[in-house]
Amino acid sequence: MANKMLKLTIILSLLISLALFVSSNDDDINNHNMEEEDDDEEQELYVVDTPLQNQRSRSRFLATIIKKGRQCNRETNNICNGVRANKGKDLLFCCKKHCRNILSDKNNCGVCGNKCKQGEKCCNGVCTNVMSNVHHCGKCKRECLNGDPCGNGFCGY
């Protein structure tokens, strides 16, 4: 009787372990897909192209880094007022007390407070319908080749 209970307990624990393993892999896959989409929109760090006026760089190898969403104040601590970053790909402005990249932020596209509509992304400071635009198909700067149309964010759809 004890032998049967031991086997039953082992089998049950293996099944539970397998179920947990399968469900955690599904979560990892879903989170990975979400991370890929987030990578398209904005980076977490901005490396400023030129040193900020109020900070003197002691070395050309020491870069000024601004984190995404860093707090700022237009009057007293405006560290991101028209600052170029990441080799000119980003343009930072202080929008509602936070540093924002107005070239790719869908809530501050082109200027602070300009929100893109559903299905649009901020591509180089312009709200763009990425579901049907052949120059920005599915994401910014994804161009459809050979005259293929863009439908639902896919070239040749």
Image (cartoon, rainbow, N blue to C red):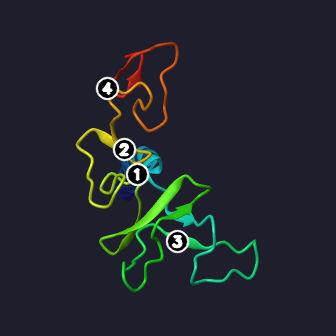
Q: Which mark sits nearer the N-terminus, 1 or 4? A: 1
Q: Which residue is mark 2?
A: 126
Question: Which residue is located at x 27 percent, y 54 percent?
Answer: 114
Mark seen at residue 66: 3
Which quadrant would residue 127 be assigned to in this image?
A: top left
Q: Which residue is mark 1?
A: 24
- Mark 1 and mark 2: span between their CA atoms? 39 Å
Q: Position of residue 82 (x, y in %)?
A: 47, 65
Mark 4, residue position: 152
Determine the residue positioned at 41% across, 53% down: 17
Spatial CA span between label 1 and label 4: 30 Å
CA separation in Å, label 1 and label 3: 34 Å
Q: Secondary structure at mark 4?
A: loop
Tell which circle, 1 or 2, labels the residue nearer the N-terminal end.
1
User: Is 125 on the left-hand or right-hand side of 90?
Assistant: left
Disc 1 vs disc 3: which is toward the camera?
A: 3
- Label located before the other in sequence (3 or 2): 3
